[in-house]
Image (tube, rainbow, N blue to C red):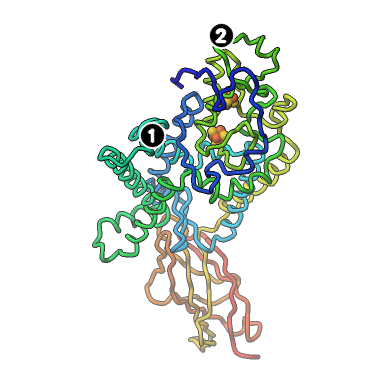
């Protein structure tokens, strides 16, 4: 922080005595609302300090991954694509289909177990460091706002000023930049759903052919524009469910951004040339009541009131307070990453029994997920007897059944498919083309005639087993029913 430390006069102007604190007052109203219910717009001061620097570096990495993600191809498949419309998903270049439902179920369980253990151990580290909402809001949109409108005080003054040509120009320019960026973000999200190729096709093709796609591009843009230009911190406090259920996961050993009330209270303004021993002997704590931690908070709360649902653990207040502590010559870390037990009893962060249990569950789920992915068959086949058919008399006295066969090729190469009967005399004839070729990452369908010697049948319905082969390698074994004459 480049500002000189104000000789900390509180709003009430008390210089010498600790200001009485109404601990429960903050529960009476929202930090982002006036008492009459109108929204209180947060003009958060731009943080500066080591944590803000680290978050900025992290944001560049995450933004790079986010914007490049849809264009990165592994074996010609997107790095990540969640095409819920066509129910086709690509994760790390592996295509998944609705037929892989069990893998999805385990993946979702793993995801939620991961969130639970992560939140129990590290609180809302995700929110402050990696959540796209926080990264884009605090480290992209708000930075652009500082660049266009100036610091928090200038923004506030501009907001209160009458509408002049200058104000209209600045505000219009900011909104245009926000809208353009929202368009970019909306389209990036859309390409995670329909793939970048499909998005580019919508952009370059005749718009009349893609009114639906263009409608979604506009919708996504408007949603992101509304979030970053208007909703802002309210997306975290009112919409996101994660902040709501975190209170059920946090305990006294969870690492959170916390104010060391034991060291900080009773708070009292810092007087120039004040001697530390004198300050301490008169019962004052290290908090100089400068409100810098509140000024930088993007959700408008006072961390000194304790852990709150609105706190996204963005670390801005740590930087602000550290800067103040450095200026007055007190140790940094009055606000820091700590657990309640760390603050109350000086305990280091611990790996508790609850965390161990969650970790064991998570390890089991991850192992199951890896096992399912590694043992996933490369093809998935369905043999269905053709509707309305029973059996027919074939040549050489054999009985034949007609089947409709669907084969899903989950590999990245075209597969020439053959079928062989397991443990039975007879033959399988693929109808149509000489070679049944299933294109890579595609579902193909054909009709197949199975002919068996009636002497090998065990009744009107016989269970048979068919091997599905590609390039001479057995890919799958399918069981189906063969219908013959009554005995
Ligand atoms: S209290 Fe601190 S960590 Fe929490 S949101 Fe506000 S500035 Fe960020
Ligand atoms: S906690 Fe730190 S930044 Fe906040 S009011 Fe006290 S001294 Fe200032």
Q: Are marks 2 and 1 in contact (CB under 8 Å)?
A: no
Q: Write the residue at 33% across / 55% down.
A: 199
Quarter of the figure that contains the C terminus: bottom right
Query: Residue 255, position in %: x, y?
Result: 65, 33
Give 480 or 465, whichever is nearer the viewer.
480
Residue corresponding to mark 1: 157
Q: 323 or 378: nearer the eye?
A: 323
- Residue at x 34% of width, y 64% of height: 212
**In the rendered image, the vertical position of residue 360 relative to residue 222, given as above or below:** above
Residue 318 position (above or below residue 477) = above
Q: Residues within 10 Å of mark 1 (few under 14, many from 20)?
A: few
* Gap between marks 2 and 1 measured at Cα: 33 Å
Name the residue: 66% across, 26% down: 260
In this orientation, which residue lies closer to the viewer: 332 or 111?
332
Q: Pinpoint residue 246: horizontal percent, then vertical percent.
A: 64, 45
Residue 259 visible from this viewpoint: yes
Q: Give the residue number, with chain letter if any, for mark 2.
A: 273
Eyeballing the image, is 295 above or below 428? Answer: above
Q: In this view of the protein, which residue sits in the foreground, 222 or 403? A: 222
Q: Could you say where residue 252 lies in the image, as x and y percent from the top left?
A: 72, 35
Q: Quadrant of ligand 2?
A: top right
Q: Earlier in the sequence, mark 2 or mark 1?
A: 1
Element type at mark 1: helix
The answer to whether 176 appears left or right of 419 in the picture is left
The answer to whether the residue bearing label 2 lies less than 8 angstroms from the nearest atom of ligand 2 is no
| Above-or-below relation of 159 to 440 | above
Residue shown at 49%/75% (left/top)? 428
Secondary element under disc 2, as helix, strand or loop, is: loop
For the residue carrying disc 2, how many other residues have a C-alpha within 10 Å: few (<14), some (14-19), or many (20+)?
A: few
- Among the 4 quarters of the image, the one containing residue 168: top left
């Amino acid at each position: 922080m480049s500002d000189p430390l104000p000789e900390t006069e509180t709003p009430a102007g008390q210089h010498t005595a600790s200001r009485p604190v109404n601990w429960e007052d903050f529960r009476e109203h929202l930090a982002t609302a006036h008492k009459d219910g109108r929204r209180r717009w947060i003009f958060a001061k731009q943080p500066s300090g080591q944590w803000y620097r680290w978050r900025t570096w992290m944001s560049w990495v995450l933004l790079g991954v986010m914007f490049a993600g849809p264009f990165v191809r592994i074996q010609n498949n997107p790095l990540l694509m969640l095409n819920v419309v066509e129910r086709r998903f690509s994760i790390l270049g592996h295509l998944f289909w609705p037929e892989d439902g069990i893998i999805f179920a385990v993946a979702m369980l793993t995801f939620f177990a991961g969130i639970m253990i992560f939140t129990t151990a590290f609180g809302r580290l995700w929110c402050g460091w990696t959540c796209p909402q926080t990264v884009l809001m605090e480290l992209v949109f708000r930075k652009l706002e500082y660049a266009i409108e100036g610091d928090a005080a200038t923004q506030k003054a501009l907001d209160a000023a009458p509408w002049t040509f200058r104000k209209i120009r600045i505000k219009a320019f900011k909104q245009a930049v926000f809208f353009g960026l929202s368009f970019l973000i909306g389209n990036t999200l859309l390409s995670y759903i329909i793939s970048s190729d499909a998005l580019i096709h919508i952009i370059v093709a005749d718009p009349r052919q893609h009114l639906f796609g263009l409608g979604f591009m506009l919708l996504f843009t408007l949603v992101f524009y509304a979030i970053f230009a208007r909703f802002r911190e309210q997306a975290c406090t009112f919409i996101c469910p994660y902040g709501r259920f975190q209170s059920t996961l946090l305990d006294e050993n969870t690492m959170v951004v916390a104010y060391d009330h034991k060291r900080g209270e009773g708070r009292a303004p810092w007087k120039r040339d004040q001697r530390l021993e004198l300050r301490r002997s008169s019962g004052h704590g290290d908090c100089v009541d400068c409100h810098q931690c509140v000024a930088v908070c993007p959700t408008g709360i006072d961390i000194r009131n304790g852990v709150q649902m609105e706190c996204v653990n963005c670390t801005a207040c740590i930087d602000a307070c550290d800067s103040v502590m450095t200026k007055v010559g007190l140790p940094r870390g009055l606000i820091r990453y700590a657990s309640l037990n760390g603050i109350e009893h000086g305990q280091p962060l611990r790996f508790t029994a609850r965390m161990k249990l969650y970790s064991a569950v998570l390890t089991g789920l991850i192992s199951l997920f890896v096992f399912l992915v590694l043992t996933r068959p490369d093809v998935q086949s369905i043999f269905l007897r053709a509707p309305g058919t029973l059996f027919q008399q074939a040549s050489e006295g054999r009985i034949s059944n007609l089947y409709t066969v669907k084969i899903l090729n989950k590999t990245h190469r075209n597969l020439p498919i053959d079928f062989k009967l397991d443990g039975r005399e007879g033959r399988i004839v693929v109808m149509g083309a000489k070679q049944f070729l299933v294109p890579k990452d595609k579902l193909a369908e054909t009709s197949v005639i199975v002919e068996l010697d009636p002497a090998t049948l065990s009744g009107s319905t016989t269970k048979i087993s068919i091997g599905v082969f590609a390039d001479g390698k057995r890919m799958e074994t399918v069981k189906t029913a063969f219908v013959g004459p009554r005995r």
